[in-house]
Image (cartoon, rainbow, N blue to C red):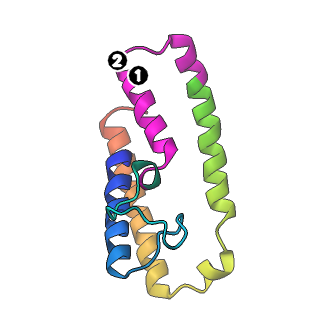
């Protein structure tokens, strides 16, 4: 769903920008394409195209098993780095100054998510 969602959101953002007559951030003023829509490479990031291409290759069975094992290891490491980056990017002062209702809603949703996850893990016999 990553590719279609990014493309749809890009098209919506472009349409809203045109209605507000704001320039496209990546284009200088006066360089907007005549047809009003930026080219595809400005609507969808290259990593999305690469992801979809690799997913197609994997689905077709065209990637060797050795590459898949190495990719799994790299994927795990990059996921850890991404999660750490998200955590390190959190401003604790902003979180601490949040309204108690917001904090309560977040806490309840996290607890509910944990309960549902643990219930599914036990129901599916994963552990």
Element type where label 2 sits in the image: loop
Residue underneath mark 1: 57
Residue underneath mark 2: 60
Where residue 35 sits, quadrant-wise, is bottom left
Image coords of residue 9 (percent x, y): 35, 61
Q: Is residue 5 above or below residue 79?
A: below
Cα–Cα span, label 2 and label 1:
5 Å
The residue drawn where x is 42% and y is 30% is 53
Q: Which residues are magenta?
A: 43-70
**Which SS type dominates the magenta stretch?**
helix
For the residue carrying disc 1, how many other residues have a C-alpha within 10 Å: few (<14), some (14-19), or many (20+)? few
Q: Quadrant of the C terminus?
A: top left
Instruction: Say left or right for 105 vs 68.
Output: left
The residue drawn where x is 35% and y is 74% is 18
| Pointers 2 and 1 in contact (C-beta within 8 Å) | yes
Instruction: Say left or right for 47 vs 56.
Output: right
Count the numbered circles shown.
2
């Amino acid at each position: 769903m990553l590719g279609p969602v990014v493309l749809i959101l890009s098209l919506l953002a472009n349409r809203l920008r045109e209605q507000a007559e704001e320039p496209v951030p990546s284009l200088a003023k006066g360089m907007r394409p005549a047809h009003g829509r930026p080219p595809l490479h400005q609507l969808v990031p290259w990593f999305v195209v690469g992801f979809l291409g690799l997913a197609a290759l994997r689905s077709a069975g065209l990637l060797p098993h050795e590459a898949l094992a190495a990719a799994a290891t790299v994927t795990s490491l990059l996921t850890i780095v991404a999660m750490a980056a998200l955590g390190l990017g959190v401003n604790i002062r902003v979180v601490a100054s949040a309204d108690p209702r917001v904090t309560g809603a977040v806490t309840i949703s996290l607890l509910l998510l944990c309960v549902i996850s643990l219930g599914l893990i036990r129901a599916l016999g994963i552990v």
